[in-house]
Amino acid sequence: MKRDSKVDLMRIIACAIVIGPHTYLPLIVNNNPDTSRVFIACLLADGVAVFWLINGFFLFKNKCYPILMKHTAKHILLPILLISIFVFYFNGWLTRGETLMESVRSMYWGILSFNGIGKREKDKDE
């Protein structure tokens, strides 16, 4: 399969646009916005969207829609769901230094009391 040089050039430009917002100078100088810097920031603001638009150009190249959706569910949605469940139940263990059982117990307490985790921690201090 032959590569399309025009699309590759657009990808290179999009990559440069993505890098741009990380390198431009502060927009406020002496408590006033510098119009030329704001203009450059506006030009570089949509770099990620442009990059994904160009990559989407190849999305349906060799796949039909149902196969693409199965692949997306298997390789993107399932890992997101598993990580979200893990973080939901083990948040206290990951961030507050609780044991695994305390983390799960405080999560269930928050769900059952409709007050969230913060109420349970507040009750412990009193």
Image (tube, grey):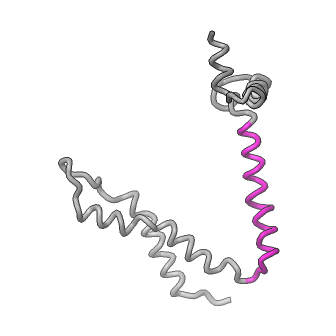
Q: Tell me what residue is drawn at x 39 percent, y 64 percent.
A: 20
Residue 84 lies in the magenta-colored region:
yes
Instruction: Name which quarter of the figure residue 4 lies in.
Output: bottom right
Residue 72 lies in the magenta-colored region:
yes
Most foreground residue, 27 or 62: 27
Instruction: Name which quarter of the figure residue 56 lies in.
Output: bottom right
Q: Quadrant of the N terminus?
A: bottom right
Which residue appears farthest toward the front when viewing the image? 114
Q: Quadrant of the C terminus?
A: top right
Name the chief secondary structure element in magenta.
Answer: helix
Left/right of residue 91 with respect to residue 30 in the rendered view: right
Provide residue 13's location: percent of width, then percent of height. 45, 75
Q: Tell me what residue is drawn at x 64 percent, y 90 percent.
A: 2
- Residues rendered magenta in the picture: 62-88
* Residue 100 visible in the displayed image: no
Provide residue 34's location: percent of width, then percent of height. 22, 58
Instruction: Name which quarter of the figure residue 87 lies in.
Output: top right
Left/right of residue 65 with respect to residue 37 in the rendered view: right
Most foreground residue, 119 or 96: 119
Provide residue 31's location: percent of width, then percent of height. 20, 47
